[in-house]
Image: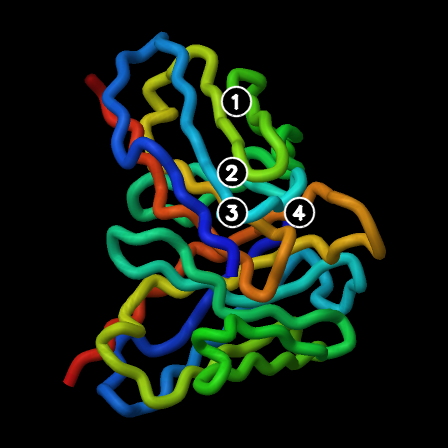
Amino acid sequence: EIVMTQSPATLSVSPGERVTLSCRASQSVNSNLAWYQQKPGQAPRLLIHGASTRATGIPARFSGSGSGTEFTLTISSLQSEDFAVYYCEQYHNWPPYTFGQGTKLEIK
Amino acid sequence: QLQLHESGPGLVKPSDTLFLSCTVSGGSISTSDYYWGWIRQPRGKGPEWIGNFDYSGRTFYNPSLKSRVTISVDTSQSNFSLRVTSVTAADTAVYYCVRHAVPPDYGDYDGGFDHWGQGTLVTVSS
């Protein structure tokens, strides 16, 4: 099973700032990686797949990069609606698909 | 547009069987382009994939749950179900039904779970 590790667990940032979240895989997943955003009481929403392709309807301020074992999600200018928990997930080697433990973005 | 909706009891007793259904509207579960399945998420934790099925009815399960989980499909009714036997408190979670793209024969692809139901909380307690 591929283990996904996200860092940091919590990030305190101010609206308008640029923020980068990290995700590491325990072995290579090529570019078969997705990022999700989850707000309280809601299902996760797919933001990025293929490591860098924005999903349908996702704003351009969200971007993903990386391949192999190291990945990042960047939000270029944080909006109030972006404060949420973000998860990475690998779909390269399954079963099982595996998720990271999440990074929580909170308002500074 | 495509919608998924979970239904089932919110409270299950320890050692009993958990049973949930997912109804799909605005799309067909018979398509060869997608897997359909279940994910669960305990409070305060990351999602955990439970299992998928494809258009032919072939199923795939998380090895950690495989001995207790069954996913069944009723194509004519556009719904599928989840059964988890011998539940314990560790099975308490929000359960989601989901859709995932089928991978190509080779190469990387834009996968991920692109549609989710709203989720249903299942609590295991006596």
Label 2: chain letter: A
Q: Amino acid at mark 2?
A: Trp
Helix, strand or loop under label 3: strand
For marks 2 and 3, give the CA distance.
6 Å
Please say if the residues under marks 4 and 1 sit with CB atoms less than 8 Å apart.
no
- x 61%, y 52%: residue: A91
Q: Position of residue B110 (x, y in %)?
A: 70, 42
Helix, strand or loop under label 2: strand
For marks 4 and 3, give the CA distance.
10 Å
**Left or right of A107 on screen, residue A23:** right
Do circles 4 and 3 both sit on a common chain? Answer: no
| Residue named by callout 1 | A62
Q: Position of residue A60 (x, y in %)?
A: 58, 18
**B92 is higher (above) or lower (below) than A39:** below
Question: How many numbered discs sit on the rendered protein?
Answer: 4
Do circles 1 and 2 both sit on a common chain? Answer: yes
Question: Can residue B114 be seen at all in this image of the molecule?
Answer: no
Please say if the residues under marks 3 and 1 sit with CB atoms less than 8 Å apart.
no
**Left or right of A35 on screen, residue A16:** left
Label 3: chain letter: A
Q: Earlier in the sequence, mark 2 or mark 3?
A: 2
> In the picture, residue B54 is in which quadrant?
bottom right
For marks 1 and 2, give the CA distance.
10 Å
Kindly report which numbered mark, 4 or 3, lies closer to the viewer in this rendering.
3
| Residue named by callout 3 | A89
Helix, strand or loop under label 1: strand
For marks 3 and 1, give the CA distance.
16 Å
Do circles 4 and 1 both sit on a common chain? Answer: no
| Residue named by callout 4 | B111
Q: Amino acid at mark 4?
A: Gly
Please say if the residues under marks 1 and 2 sit with CB atoms less than 8 Å apart.
yes
Q: Amino acid at mark 1?
A: Phe
